[in-house]
Image (spheres, rainbow, N blue to C red):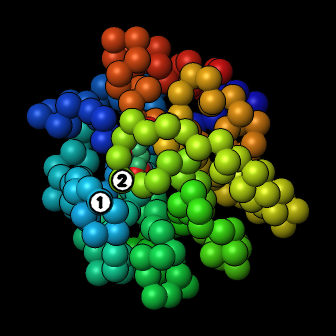
Amino acid sequence: MASSIKISPSILSCDFSKIGEEVKALEKAGADYIHVDVMDGHFVPNLTIGPEVIKNIRPFSKKIFDVHLMISPVDNYIQQFAEAGADIITFHPEATKSTKKTIELIKKFKKKVGISLKPKSKIDLLKDYLDQIDLVLIMSVEPGFAGQKFMPEVLPKLKELKSIIEKENLKLDIEIDGGINFENSKVAKEAGANVLVSGSTIFKKNNGDLKRNIDLLRQN
Ligand code: DX5
Ligand code: ZN
């Protein structure tokens, strides 16, 4: 079981003066995916990076770039993120007029598709699309900032989703994002998550020992 868990470190907590080197270090430390948080100061109250930065850090790692778009309207930028080197493009259904069309657009660029639910967003928003996507990202904090406190109230949603996916015999990554640490990683996995995103824990705990922190999140 433990070996099927994937760790997707969020570069939101890295040293932005050397993002390329940080991405390289994450790969060396055993990261499975590289989680890139894209925020527009509109869909969420924070600004981060755009496609140009992704394009520049792309050569530093062959790992899967797991790009979490917190921007609206999202369709206008899918092509740019696809061309910049995203492998998985995850969007929030509230950031598009048509979830179906956004899925089709991401697929047109031959990228994997993820849909993300904020803590209060309901499974109904994505239920009809589960057979068309590759990943569901359950937010366990309000999107916008690293370093927030994990919200255990999202765990029932994770469990419900897992049971729907099993019942329908689908193969999907279930990713959890926000406030993941060495304690709650266990309940997140038990509730059905197989991909754990983590920014603060990976970059700040144990004096920033990336390998140790990735290993601990995987094992705990
Ligand atoms: C929040 C982001 C998360 C966050 C994770 O909007 O989507 O990826 O940066 O950081 P931690 O692990 O510090 O909550
Ligand atoms: Zn994220």
> Image quadrant for the N terminus?
top right
Residue with the mark numbered 2? 144
* Cβ atoms at labels 2 and 1 below 8 Å apart: yes
Q: Which mark is residue 24?
A: none
Mark 2 beta carbon near ligand 1 (under 8 Å):
yes
Residue 62 visible to an observer of this rendering: no
Q: Position of residue 54 (x, y in %)?
A: 24, 53
- Which comes before the other along the chain, label 2 or label 1? 1
Q: Which residue lies at the image location 47% right of the left edge and 14% below the top edge?
A: 212
| Ligand 1 rendered quadrant | top left
Q: Which residue lies at the image location 39% right of the left edge and 30% below the top edge?
A: 200
Q: Which residue lies at the image location 67% right of the left edge and 38% below the top edge?
A: 188
Q: Viewer-proximal residue, 66 or 179? A: 179
The three-letter amino acid code for the residue at tag 1 is Pro
Q: Secondary structure at mark 1?
A: loop
Depicted 131 relative to depicted 98: above or below: above
> Image quadrant for the C terminus?
top right
Residue 47 visible to an observer of this rendering: yes
Q: Whole-Å distance between the Cαs marked 2 and 1?
A: 6 Å
Q: Residue furthest top?
A: 206
Mark 1 beta carbon near ligand 1 (under 8 Å):
no
Q: Viewer-proximal residue, 160 or 20? A: 160
Residue with the mark numbered 1? 45
Q: Position of residue 146 (x, y in %)?
A: 37, 41
The three-letter amino acid code for the residue at tag 2 is Gly
